[in-house]
Structures are given as structure tokens and as C-alpha cells.
Image (spheres, helix red, strand yellow):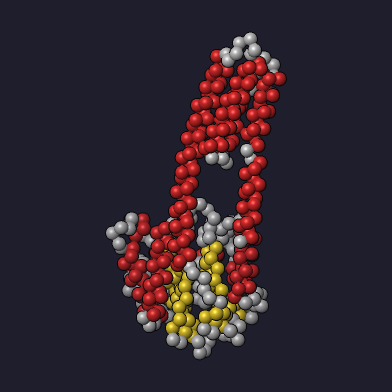
Amino acid sequence: MSQRLADLHQSMRESYWMPALPLAWLVIVVVADVLAPPDIHLGPLLVAAPAITASFGGPLLTGVIAALAVAAQALIAVLRDKQQLFSANHQAQIGALVLVGVCLVIFCTVQEHRARELSQVRNVAETAQQLALRPLPARIGPLRVASLYIAAEAEARIGGDLYAAARTPSSTRLIIGDVRGKGLSAVGDATLLVGAFRAAVRAGTDLAETAAFLDESVTWNLGEPSRTEQARETFITASLIDISDDDSGCRIVTCGHPPPLLLRKGHVMPVEPHLSAPPLGLGDMAHADYAVDAFELEAGDLLVLYTDGITEARDSGGRFYPLAERMTGWAESGPETLLKRLRQDLTRHVGGPLDDDAAVIAVERAT
């Protein structure tokens, strides 16, 4: 919240001084033109003022600056050609300024309309995404949990990263996934998968059956007649994990998703599956056999599930973020502290906003 207020304050400060640039330019050109030798005419440079304004202002401000540019050209005509007011040269320059000003106002109007449409689409997508990505509780059964979602800040690049948790009578079941593609369709696919996951857990299916049910649900959804040909080529990578309440046993099914990382006593180990199933939604591979792998999550261990928006984040030199390497030695961190540290380190690595959305879940078995 404090960052948003700071950004708003900075934006307001910029909005006050930026209109001064074209106004100052008008004054400079008028003075320079009047003082220049008779054979030098700087009036055509006035057109830069409304052009500059169009880069940051709306149609109203652009129109006002364009009108002032026309007035400035008229003032130059009065001051320089007192014997012959508004010569053919000045009339041509005034006409050109009027034409350019009208074109810039039309451009700003169209641009403002498209910006509003883009903002509305993004707001709808973000709302739908927030419904699918409800924050996980800090405590689920015997587990301490923290979740993090980092949105890409490129225009309209709402992604399909997802995560969710659900309780069974004797365990906690987690899912993390990534929909191929961007925009509202990706958010819709992510929302459908989260809903299907919760329904499968509620129905009491085991881990392999849950994976099969999710694949059938995604494949059915992608086959809807309303889907475009490009949308039908969508698939979803995902990892399903079941963590027992009673002991340190965990089970995992991986569907084309990056392997989780297990942080134990300062050492990081990837939880590599013996056999990874194909991503969800590949119709020609439906009804695959979902291999369930087992591993141990002991008291004090941290399990980190993530999407490839983390590991594929690049620095200025094009190097990927080395998640496992950076996490080594973070043994003293709990789930929430680890994710805060991860976000700060990732931001430093990238040096700006991410190019892709990213989601992370950190889980610790309470001692």
C-alpha cells in the first residue's frame, strides 16, 4: 500500500510540471523567432509543443496547447511583419498548426478510449485471477504455509499461474500450475482447474485419480466449440502434492511442471519425479498413467513450489534466476520470511518488473 501511495504521489508531481515543458517551448520559440534575422523563421518549431503534449496529456490539454501554438504563431506574425500582417508564409504556418493540432487531438481521443478499454479488460482479468488465487492461510493442519503471486507489469499480460490448497481427512493437498498463454482465457482455464481440484479432493479421490480428473476437466474445457483454434492448443503444467498429517510422508504427481525444491538444513534438493506425466489438457495423451512419487518432509524442512516465471526471470545479461543456488543457506527462514527474501532477491536480480507472472508456495511442517 505504501508503495502505491508513493507511486501516486510521484505521478501527481509529474503531472504538475510536465505541461510546463510545451509552454516553455512556445515562449522560447516566439522569443527566438522575433530576435532572429529577417530571413530566418523558427515558427514551424511551434508544432513540437502539441506533439510533446500528446505524449503525456489527454485530448483537452493537447487541444489547449495546440491553440496556444496557433496564437504564438499569430503573435510572431504581428511582431515581425508589422507592415504586412499575416503574410502568405504566416498564414500557411498557422494553417499547418491548426491541421496538426486537430490530428493530435483526434489521436489522443482514440488513444484515451483504447486505454480505458485496456484498463477495463485488465481489471476484469485481475478480479477473476484474484478469485482463483485466494491467499492461502498461514496454518493448514500441521503445516505453516505462505504463498506469493507476482504479476508481470507488461501491459495486458495477465497470466494463468495458479495455486490452491485443500484438506482431506488425514492430509493437506496442494496444487501449483501454469496455464500456457495470457489474458482472460488463461485466467478462465486457471479458475476452472482450481475448481476441479477442490471438487476432486472433496470427492475423496486419491492423488493419481485427482490428476486424471483434472486432465479430463481441462481437456473437456479446451474442446468447447467457443474456443478458438489457438485456445484449443492450450495446456497446463501442474504439480499435485499430498502431505500427511501423521508422519513425514509426502506424495507427488508431476504433470510437466518444474520440480519442487526441498530446503533441509541449508541444503536444497529438487524433488525430481521418477516419471513426469504430460501437461494437463493434451487430448492425444489423455488418460495417462499418473505415477505417484514419495518423499519425506520432516519437521523444520521447507518445501518450495513455484512456476517457471521465477526460474526464467532474467537479469540484464540474460541470465536466468538461479533459485536453488540462491536458496542454499536460507535454512533459518520460515515460509513467510523466505518468500519475502525471495521476492527482494528476485527483484534485485531482474532489476525491474518480471516479464512473466510467477507464483510460489512455501510449506513447513511445524515442529
Q: In this figure, what is the number of numbered marks? A: 0
Give 342 or 149, whichever is nearer the viewer. Answer: 149
Q: Quadrant of residue 346?
A: bottom right
Give 90 or 219, whichever is nearer the viewer. Answer: 90
Q: Position of residue 211 (x, y in %)?
A: 39, 75
Please tell me whether residue 306 is drawn above or below residue 298 in the rendered image. Answer: above
Q: Quadrant of residue 237?
A: bottom left
In the visual, does 238 lie left or right of 151? left
Q: Position of residue 241 (x, y in %)?
A: 47, 78
- Residue at x 67% of width, y 14% of height: 38
- Residue at x 44% of width, y 53% of height: 121
Asked if residue 149 can be seen in this view, the reply is: yes
Please tell me whether residue 11 is drawn above or below residue 85 in the rendered image. Answer: below
- Residue at x 30% of width, y 58% of height: 226
Q: Position of residue 168 (x, y in %)?
A: 43, 83
Quadrant for the C terminus in the image:
bottom right
Please tell me whether residue 97 is drawn above or below residue 357 in the rendered image. Answer: above
Asked if residue 303 can be seen in this view, the reply is: no
- Residue at x 33% of width, y 71% of height: 216
Q: Position of residue 50 (x, y in %)?
A: 57, 33
Residue positioned most to the top: 83
Please tell me whether residue 303 is drawn above or below residue 118 in the rendered image. Answer: below
Quadrant for the N terminus in the image:
bottom right
Residue positioned most to the right: 35
In the visual, does 13 lie left or right of 143? right
Residue positioned most to the left: 225
